[in-house]
Each structure stands twice: as C-alpha cells, then as structure tokens.
C-alpha cells in the first residue's frame, strides 16, 4: 500500500541537520544559548517588531502573554470560539473566564460585529473584558485593525494568537505584528517548526522583559537562586532554536509550496458541486492548512463521508476545530454565537497541505476528493438496472459467439424448457443440478415432472463435478446441469468431468449466463445463457443444441403490449418508473408461459450493435481496479480476479450479505443478493451463504470501483459497530 499522506508533516532537510549538528558541536546543548538569542532577533526582524521571546510552546507564550498584560483571576477574556483548545486553556491557566465569540462565515475568524456586541454587553453588565485574544484561523490574518479599535473603546488589551499565521500578511503588514503582543507556534505541524516551541512578539519592551522573567522560573539577577514570584520553565532550548533558524531561512519557499498546493485544490474544488474553500481570499495568508466546506445538499455526501473515503485511501484529514463553547471543559462559559462555528465544524475538512508533499501525493488527494464527491452531473448509482445501451454501437462489433443459425429465445427459462422437452424425447426425466441454483431455472424442470437431484458446490460456488460424475456413472440421472459463476471459465478438471459424464450417455447442459461471451466452452450437449444478466439488452437468451435438433413450439415474440412500455423510455433518464412497472408486469406474464419464443426484434437489433470485446475489456479492467481498491482497504475477494475470464461480478465474503447489501444501497451502490436456497436440497447446509457480488459493469470506470470499495469498508465498519 502507498505511504499515508499526512496533514502537515515537518519539512526538514539538510540545512536543518547542519544547523542542529553545529549547535551540538558548539557545546550549547543546555537551554538558552547564542542560537536562541539570534533566533529571537531574526524572527522579530522578519515580523517587524522590536522584541521576540523564544518559548517552549505557543501555549506557553499565550499563558505568559496574558500575565504580562495584567490579566488576573476572575477577569473576562474574549476569544474566538473556533480555535484550538490551547487558546482557551491559557485563559484558564491565569484564572480568568473565557468568553467565546462566534466566527465570520467567510473566513472562520472572529466575527467583528459580534465581538463589538459582546464587549458592549459585558460592559453594560458590569463585567468588562480585560483582554481580547483573536485567532488567525488556518493562517488567515483576522481583521485586527477593527479588533484593536473595539478593544480601545472598551479599555481592553489585545494578545493575538497567530500560532497558525506566521508568514501571512494583511494589508502589507505581517502576521504577528498586531496587538499589544502576538504569539506564534513552531509545533511540528506548523508552517515552520522547531519540533516544539513558540515565541512572543511585541514592540513593548516591558512586556518582553516580563515574559522573559516569568519564563525562566522568575529568577532574580543575583548570584544565588532567588525568585520574587512563581515562575515557569518555559524557555526554548538552544538546539531547537538552531533548527528554527534554519527553517526561517526556508520559510518563504515553504509558504510558496503551500500556496501552490492550495491553488491546485482551488482548481479542483471549482469543478465539484458542493465543495468550497474556506477563507480563500487574496493569497496573502501562508496557506498553512487548506480547508474545504462540504454542502451535503449539493455534494450528496456529508463531510464525515468524505473524510472516511480519504482515510480509506491513506490520506489524513481533520475536521475544523470543534468550537470551544461546545467543549465539555468549558461547559457553562459565556458565549456569543450565531451557529457559524458549529456549521464550519460540521462541514469543514482540513486537507493535507504540508510543504513537504510532492505532486504525486497531491494527485492522490485530488483523485480521492473527486471519487468521494463527484460533480452532481457525473455522480451516478452503481449497479442499477441496465438502460438501453446504444453507446456501445459506435464501434464495429467484433466478438460474436452466436451465429445466424444460433437459436435466440426470449428468456433463459424458455431455453431450459426447450432443452427439457428435447431430452424427454429420449426418455429423460432425472437431472442433477448444483446446490446453488435459482428457482426460476428449476421451474421449467419441475413443471415437466422431472426428478431433481442436487450435488454440492464449493466455497466459491463452483460445481463439485466429481459428485455429479459419480451420480452419472451410477445411473441415477439422465442429465447434469453445470455452471460457473462470476464469469469464470470451466477448469481443465471440470472439462474432464464433463467428458466422463457424457461418456456414460448422460446429457450435459451448460448454463453460461455469467459468461455469455464465448458459447459452449464446456463442450456440453446443450448450452444456453440469459443475456439480460450481463448485457444491456431488453430480453434474450442464446440456445445451443445438437445440429439438426428441432426446437419445440418456437413462436414469434408477442411484442404488442410488452414493448409498449418502452414508449416512455427516455435515453437520458433511463427506464422510467411507469415503464418499469409495465415491463415487469409483461415479463411476469411471459415467464409463466414456458413455451419458447424468439427473441424480440428490438432486443436482437440492440444485441447485434453491441461490441462484446469492448464490454469484456471494460469488465476485466473494472474487476482488476476493484480488486486493487479492495486490497487497499483490507478486503479480500472471494475468488482471484485472474480466475475470471470476463467477470460478471466480483464476489467478497461478508458476515451478513443482506444487511451489507442494504447499507450499500443507501449509498447508491446496488448489489444482487443471491437467490434463496431451494427447498429440499440435500446439500443445502453446505451451501456457502456469506458471498456478496459486487458490480463491475462496463458502464462504470476505475473511480466507480474505488467508490464501491470505500462504501463496502464503511458498511463493514458500521455493521461491526466499529468507531471510525
């Protein structure tokens, strides 16, 4: 399987390795050192502020920043509800009360209008906010000019959480340069990393000095260890600062790569109904993470389903932040909400955006997105009824297993009835059939009063012809019905058994319904196939009989009435509900009449236009693609694809085929359920009943096959009660 694609893995290389090795060799391994000092100067200069204090994490920077701004226990601090927990946790660290404000629907950042309302409300209530902590969501800089104006009106300080926006710009001003102070993060998934780490950035020397003092255990500048207050061990190590300095040199290139990835996503999303990028503005943000919003009404799937598809293909994604006002840790906290952040959480997906991702990885993500959310005009049910398929008539037909002399009748059931009638002329009245067989095939045999013996099938439903051979050799039967399912051709051993059965004078009848592409591969006395099961025809079955045999009671098809239903056929919409009801009713009448009739002129005309080679090639390609997709999600096929000459279906084993089929149908993937067990069969207990056949029709392509595999995996998880 392909390596898993991560959301935002660290992008480090030779430059970072050289920097860390140099720091090790310098002897500055303990916390602090010349690389810390240089890192603070270089990043502050990059952002355009006077001071930087390198710390162990962005969370530590938030904590100490609040303390340096004078926030105390019991104070109110207003912040974004749509943020990582660290923002709210830092407020709790100082004993203050977070007040959450909802998101702007276009960007996900703090709703400035709602912020103004919240600040005014708190002031009227006598509990004014001491500070505001706005968050630059996913790298997009918030409207800090407006936020600072609101803060100034209410006498509040501003500490900007720019953990995700280093390298972004707004109106020509760098992220990290707003507020009384800003913080950035160098966590492993950020746009640049020091493995772990963060920095407080400010123009206020007093704030920087205060944070630096608290971060070093509040140690006083005397020879002995003296501390004038409780401090913290929050400083960044020299080794990590060396890594950060190397990353800072590559920051512009890494941001350019993330922006190129976003541009690729933008182009793809524009062509898919129901998807939109969140906060995709003028391109000044660092494109730390690209997030898409999924509209279930237009996309026909929800965000959870899309994430499951990508996860099944080894692609890491993440929902957007769960709003803080919904978090159990902050239950009861004051919140000013509009429902926007809840909607973003419900519909948003962060896509792999790391600068270390190559084009092939992004191709995989794009392909998975397209498979999960196809354009509405292209999304289609899989495995539904065949429409009248005139599209295959463009090429000149090549493969043609039947000839003008082949008897073409309306249904496979009528073909069986004709064969039984012919065999009765020689006194036949006993037949051996495989245990896995449908009652529709048995009905014409039972109607003639024949005695039916069953013989076992193996785990893949192939016939155990050694038992049938012994029955023939013992003189217990006059005929043997043989068949292979899923498009498998008979094996050499099976052909040997057929020859041995015929040598006893017992007739062999081959049902080739699952492989109608090459007639009578079994070398049987009689062969037939119901063509409607695999080919897009209105009706039809071929019937191969010994030369010179007269087919009894063969009549012309009575098309009047039956095919009046086709008058409402629309080539764009397929068979309408009205015409389907009429067609089913007509077929029921025909099936009750066992007298064989010729295939309809309309059906034969369609059949003669089909390029069977093209159909066969597509089915083979689809089966291979489906098997590979199933393997990617850890599901094995019940039969090897290589054993199928032209696959009719591809079977898998499931614990509950009926429930699985129902779950797939809800996802618009329709699978045939195997027929019930015939009553009275001696071998029915040995009949494998855990098989589910998956469609590989020529109407579909490799993307559809991947969708089948993904939906099957989801159904298996759901039925097993597995939490995804």
Image (spheres, grey):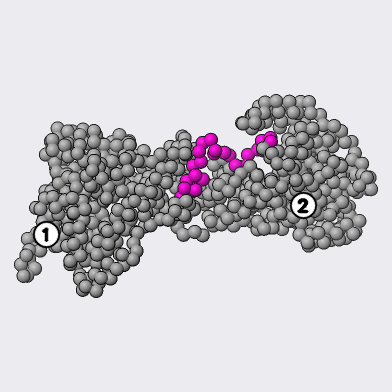
Residue at x 14%, y 32% (from the top left corner): 124
Q: Main secondary structure of the magenta part?
A: loop
Q: Which of the labelled discs sits on residue 213, or is there none?
A: 1
Q: Quadrant of residue 468?
A: bottom right
Counting the numbered discs, the total is 2
Provide the residue designation for mark 2. Answer: 483
Disc 1 from disc 2: Cα separation: 84 Å
Residue at x 21%, y 73% (from the top left corner): 26
Report the side of 665 relative to 296 (left or right): right
For label 2, count other residues whose C-alpha is less than 10 Å away and answer few (under 14), some (14-19) or many (20+).
many
Residue at x 74%, y 43% (from the top left corner): 397
Q: Residue 195: give x, y in percent of width and height.
A: 29, 61
Q: Secondary structure at mark 1?
A: helix
Q: Secondary structure at mark 2?
A: strand
Report the side of 321 relative to 724 (left or right): left
- From the viewer's perspective, is residue 523 above or below residue 569? below
Find the magenta span and give its range: 365-390
Does the magenta-highlighted stretch encompass residue 87?
no
Quick check: marks 1 and 2 in contact, CB under 8 Å? no
Q: Residue furthest left?
A: 222
Residue at x 91%, y 47% (from the top left corner): 547
- From the viewer's perspective, is residue 694 above or below residue 9? above
Does the magenta-highlighted stretch encompass residue 380?
yes
Task: Please report whichever mark, 1 or 2, sits nearer to the chain's N-terminal start.
Answer: 1
In the image, 117 versus 535, the foreground residue is 535
Say if residue 711 shows up in the picture: yes
Q: Residue 187: give x, y in percent of width and height.
A: 29, 57
Q: Residue 689: give x, y in percent of width and height.
A: 66, 52
For label 1, count other residues whose C-alpha is less than 10 Å away and answer few (under 14), some (14-19) or many (20+).
many
Q: Which of the labelled discs sits on residue 76, or is there none?
A: none
């Amino acid at each position: 399987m392909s390596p898993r694609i991560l959301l935002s893995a660290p992008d480090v290389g030779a430059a970072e390795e050289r920097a860390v090795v140099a720091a090790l060799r310098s002897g500055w391994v303990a916390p602090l050192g010349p690389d810390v000092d240089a890192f603070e100067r270089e990043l502050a200069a990059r952002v355009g502020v006077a001071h930087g204090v390198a710390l162990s994490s962005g969370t530590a920077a938030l904590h100490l920043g609040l303390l340096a701004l004078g926030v105390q226990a019991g104070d109110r601090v207003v912040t974004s509800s749509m943020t990582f927990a660290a923002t709210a946790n830092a407020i709790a660290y100082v004993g203050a009360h977070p007040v959450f404000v909802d998101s702007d629907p276009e960007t996900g950042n703090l709703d400035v209008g709602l912020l103004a309302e919240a600040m005014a409300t708190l002031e009227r209530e006598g509990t004014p906010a001491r500070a505001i902590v706005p968050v630059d969501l996913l790298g997009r800089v918030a409207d800090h000019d407006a936020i600072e104006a609101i803060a100034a009106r209410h006498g509040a300080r501003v500490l900007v959480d720019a953990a995700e926006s280093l390298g972004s710009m707004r109106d020509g001003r760098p992220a990290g340069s707003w507020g009384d102070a800003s913080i950035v993060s160098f966590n492993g998934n950020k746009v640049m990393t020091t493995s772990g780490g963060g920095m407080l950035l400010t123009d206020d020397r007093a704030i920087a000095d205060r944070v630096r003092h608290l971060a070093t255990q509040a140690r006083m500048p005397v020879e002995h260890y003296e501390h004038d207050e409780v401090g913290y061990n929050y400083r960044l190590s020299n080794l990590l600062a060396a890594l950060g300095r190397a990353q800072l040199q590559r920051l512009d290139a890494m941001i350019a790569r993330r922006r190129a990835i976003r541009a690729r996503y933008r182009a793809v999303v524009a062509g898919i109904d129901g998807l939109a990028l969140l906060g995709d503005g003028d391109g000044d943000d660092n494109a730390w993470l690209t997030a898409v919003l999924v509209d279930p009404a237009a996309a026909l799937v929800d965000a959870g389903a899309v994430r499951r598809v990508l996860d099944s293909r080894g692609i890491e994604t993440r929902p957007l932040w769960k709003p803080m006002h919904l978090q159990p840790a902050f239950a009861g906290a004051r919140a000013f909400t509009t429902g926007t952040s809840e909607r973003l959480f419900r519909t948003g997906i962060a896509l792999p955006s790391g600068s270390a991702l190559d084009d092939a990885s992004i191709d995989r993500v794009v392909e998975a997105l397209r498979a999960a959310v196809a354009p509405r005009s292209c999304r289609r049910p899989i495995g539904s009824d065949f429409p009248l398929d005139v599209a295959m008539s463009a090429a000149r037909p090549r493969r043609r297993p039947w000839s003008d002399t082949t008897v073409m009748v309306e249904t496979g059931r009528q073909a069986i009835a004709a064969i039984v009638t012919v065999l009765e002329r020689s006194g036949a009245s006993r037949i051996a059939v495989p245990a896995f067989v449908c009652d529709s095939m048995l009905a014409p045999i039972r109607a003639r009063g024949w005695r039916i013996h069953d013989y076992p099938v193996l785990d893949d439903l192939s016939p155990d012809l050694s038992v049938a051979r012994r029955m023939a050799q013992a003189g217990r039967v006059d005929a043997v019905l043989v068949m292979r399912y899923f498009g498998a051709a008979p094996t050499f051993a099976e052909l040997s058994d057929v020859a041995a059965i015929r040598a006893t004078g017992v007739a062999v009848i081959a049902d080739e319904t699952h492989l109608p592409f090459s007639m009578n591969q079994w070398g049987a006395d009689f062969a037939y196939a119901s063509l409607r099961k695999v080919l897009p025809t209105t009706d039809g079955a071929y019937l191969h009989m010994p030369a010179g045999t007269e087919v009894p009671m063969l009549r012309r098809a009575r098309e009047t009435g039956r095919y009046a239903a086709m008058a409402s056929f629309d080539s764009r919409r397929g068979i309408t509900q009205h015409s389907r009801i009429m067609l089913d009713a007509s077929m029921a009448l025909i099936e009750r009449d066992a007298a064989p009739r010729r295939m309809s002129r309309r059906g034969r005309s369609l059949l003669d236009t089909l390029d069977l080679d093209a159909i066969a090639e597509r089915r083979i390609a689809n089966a291979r693609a489906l098997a590979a997709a199933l393997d990617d999600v850890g599901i094995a096929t019940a039969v090897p694809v290589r054993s199928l000459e032209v696959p009719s279906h591809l079977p898998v084993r499931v614990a509950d085929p009926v429930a699985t089929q129902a779950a797939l149908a809800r996802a618009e993937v329709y699978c045939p359920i195997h027929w019930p067990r015939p009553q009275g069969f001696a071998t029915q207990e040995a009949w494998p009943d855990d098989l589910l056949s998956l469609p590989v029709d020529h109407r579909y392509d490799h993307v559809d096959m991947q969708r089948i595999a993904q939906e099957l995996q989801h159904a298996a998880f759901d039925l097993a009660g597995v939490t995804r």
